[in-house]
Image (cartoon, coloured by chain):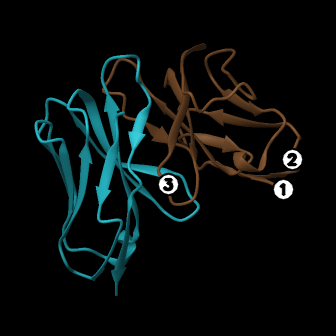
Chain colours: A brown, B cyan
């Protein structure tokens, strides 16, 4: 098991375009989380899944953002009509339920909106 | 609002010194607390997890303590090495209210001078 993986690692897009990121969690982990991190800040929670169910969404997750985990394995995060303010590192993490819910992070996807 | 604060924001020390990084949180109703390391442009590496019932955890040269009543955690690094240079992030998993994402501090940027 190589840990949490994310693709692509970098994405440059023009304002108004749609982008999709993928996260593959640690294979036996049933919880999957998405975070966003901007320069000089700690990561901010966006949403999480328990198996295929999306159980919580942050107020940061505007209606342009949608996340899925259709078979309870990998997850995708889509941003529609990207804006320059969406430029950030998007991080995925996974953990095992039941606890202690130690979260393991992937390398992140760096999004630049021009 | 549940917040996490890390002091200092940056720290530069000579190799070999022992050092302490501080983390404070506003709500004592926590499930666990994690310390992470982040290298520039990379994802997060989990260093230590302390559950709410624990007072400290140790891994190699690292020791983390937790005092829920005062809302504080410390990360002690013994015999620092240049390879310890990174940003250290404290994150709290608050319990209750469906808040299952981690709340992060802004981190302490650590430089170990050879």
> Can I make out residue B97 in this image?
yes
Q: Residue under mark 2: which chain is it in?
A: A
Q: Residue under mark 3: which chain is it in?
A: A
Residue A35 falls in image quadrant: top right
Left/right placement of residue A91 relative to residue B88 reads right
What residue would you read off at disc 2?
A: A15
Residue B50 falls in image quadrant: top left
The mark that comes first in sequence, 1 or 2, is 2
Q: What x and y, as percent, mark residue A67?
A: 68, 24
Q: What x and y, as percent, mark residue B94?
A: 32, 28
> Can I make out residue A27 in this image?
no
Left/right placement of residue B41 relative to residue A102 reads right
Q: Mark 1 and mark 2 in contact? Answer it, CB < 8 Å.
A: yes
Q: What x and y, as percent, mark residue B89?
A: 38, 53
Mark 1 vs mark 2: tell me if same chain.
Answer: yes
The mark that comes first in sequence, 3 or 1, is 3
Residue at mark 1 to residue at mark 2: CA–CA distance: 6 Å
What residue would you read off at disc 1?
A: A114
Quadrant where the C terminus of chain B is found in the figure: bottom left
Residue at mark 3 to residue at mark 2: CA–CA distance: 23 Å
């Amino acid at each position: 098991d190589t840990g949490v993986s994310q693709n692509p690692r970098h994405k440059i897009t023009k304002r108004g375009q749609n982008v999709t990121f993928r996260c593959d969690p640690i294979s036996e982990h049933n919880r999957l989380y998405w975070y966003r991190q901007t320069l000089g800040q700690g990561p901010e929670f966006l949403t999480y899944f328990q198996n295929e169910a999306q159980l919580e969404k942050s107020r940061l997750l505007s209606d342009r953002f949608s996340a899925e985990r259709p078979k309870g394995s990998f997850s995708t995060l889509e941003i529609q009509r990207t804006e320059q303010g969406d430029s950030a590192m998007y991080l995925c993490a996974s953990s095992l339920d039941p606890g202690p819910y130690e979260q393991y992070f992937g390398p992140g996807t760096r999004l630049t909106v021009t | 609002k549940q917040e996490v604060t890390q002091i200092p924001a940056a720290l530069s020390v000579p190799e070999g010194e022992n050092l302490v990084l501080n983390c404070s949180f506003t709500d004592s109703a926590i499930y666990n607390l994690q310390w992470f390391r982040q290298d520039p442009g990379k994802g997060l590496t989990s260093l230590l997890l302390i559950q709410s019932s624990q007072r400290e955890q140790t891994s190699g040269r690292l020791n983390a303590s937790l005092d829920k009543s005062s809302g504080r955690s410390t990360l002690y690094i013994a015999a620092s090495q240049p390879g310890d240079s990174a940003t250290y992030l404290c994150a709290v998993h608050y319990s209750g209210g469906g808040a299952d994402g981690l709340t992060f501090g802004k981190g302490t940027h650590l430089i170990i001078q050879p």
